[in-house]
Image (cartoon, rainbow, N blue to C red):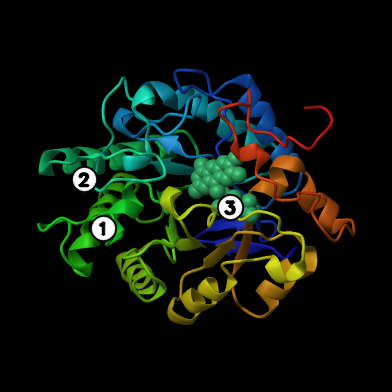
Amino acid sequence: MLFEPYNLAGIELKNRIVRSATYEKRANEDGFVTDALIEFYKDLTRGGVGLIITGNALVHVSGRTSSQMTCIHNDFYIDKLKRLTNAVHRFDGKVILQLIHGGRQCFPDLLGGENPIAPSEVHDPSTKITPREMTNEEIWEIIDAFGDAARRAMYAGFDGIQIHGAHGYLVSEFLSPHTNRRDDYWGGDEGRRFHFVEEIYKAMRKEVGNNYPILIKMNVDDFVEGGLEPEESVRVAKRLEELGMDAVEVSGGMYESKGKTCQIDILKKEQEAYFRKASRLFKKELNIPVILVGGIRSKNVAEDVLQRGDADLISMSRPLIREPDLPNKFMQGKEKADCISCNGCLRFKKLDVVKCVQLKTV
Ligand SMILES: Cc1cc2nc3c(=O)[nH]c(=O)nc-3n(C[C@H](O)[C@H](O)[C@H](O)COP(=O)(O)O)c2cc1C
């Protein structure tokens, strides 16, 4: 099944392998697409992956998570982004842009010294940051920014967009009872915590129309005390489906939960696909496509996930940093990715670009 074509909300994919969103550190300091970023995406496309989800792209300056991340918070960015989508399409690839606001997981040095913003002033022991609570006006400004970014992504030729609703960034913070302690339209109970992502979805849909794919990556579990848990996250996904969301990618964890998103030392088959139980749960409740990410390393594990109906598509990040042509190698008979899940690629502050630190050429 892995190499069977798949129609994802109208996007014809040549196989069921997705490159999960992965920050590349290849935009320039102002967030514009560079030749290096385009070459990187050409390599990925030629490597045979069915769908690429880009590294998180910034919708508003108050949500910057990293230096040299791709930006889309202004119309100025559209032309260069178009070069990127053209490059992927020229090699018969498909590419979706992931949109982010980093919320409390931003660092003041990337925000001109400003304190990060968040639903509530909940201290993050992992970063030692206590964010500032957003005003109602600021919340609407960010919702509009997501809508504007969606329109720009469509103009730039992306095949769709993905809301980064996972890993403890702003959208995930509003959904989480741990980081959202508000008692207003935006928080206080499950229904109100849902409003932020709901309004973002509606703002985007208004901009891009009914036929443009909108996906979300979301947490099944925050893995922190009092955080989002599977029962509620499935209900969130169901509500999103009812609104018209086209697909959901299942992940988990936040900075504070330490090591749950990108688990290390995935060396045995039993350790692979560590959110599989969660995606099975989502598959049971949802009719829209479910994408599984997290620790998929072997062709037969990926195949088994699909055969058993635990997900509709499988998604990988770290293995494709090491081997952008892994899908072609799988097709030619390779069984297992070379990635050893050491997370050296995650220490990107020290790296010039995001890359595999195990390779000799580094
Ligand atoms: C270097 C690096 C950058 C990442 N950047 C993003 C990102 O921009 N957006 C996102 O949703 N996840 C990001 N992730 C998480 C991955 O998409 C994925 O969820 C996680 O690595 C688990 O999948 P894997 O085991 O296949 O690597 C990143 C992971 C790594 C290692």
Q: Nearer the viewer, residue 58 or 174?
A: 174
Q: Residue at x 31, y 48 (%)?
A: 204
Asked which secondary structure carries label 1, the reply is: helix
Identity of the amino acid at label 3?
Answer: Cys
Q: Secondary structure at mark 2?
A: loop
Task: Judge by depth and name the residue closer to the eye, 154 or 143.
Answer: 143
What residue would you read off at disc 1? Answer: 198
Residue 241 - label: none
Nearer mark to the viewer, of 3 and 2: 2
Q: Earlier in the sequence, mark 2 or mark 1?
A: 2
Ligand 1 within 8 angstroms of badge 2 C-beta: no
Residue that carries the numbered disc 3 in the rendered image: 262
Q: Quadrant of residue 153?
A: top left
Q: Which quadrant of the figure has residue 73?
A: top left
Between 224 and 232, the residue placed more toward the observer is: 224
Labelled pair 3, 2 in contact (Cβ < 8 Å): no
Residue 71: name its quadrant: top left
Determine whether label 2 and label 1 are within 8 Å by CB: no
- In the displayed structure, 256 sits above or below 45; it is below
Q: Position of residue 120 (x, y in %)?
A: 20, 48
* CA gap, disc 2 and disc 1: 22 Å
Instruction: State whether label 3 is within 8 Å of ligand 1.
Output: yes
**Amino acid residing under circle 1:** Glu
Give how far across and how far down residue 138 sits, in percent: 17, 38
Q: Residues within 10 Å of mark 1 (few under 14, many from 20)?
A: some
For disc 2, the marked residue is 121
Q: Amino acid at mark 2?
A: Glu
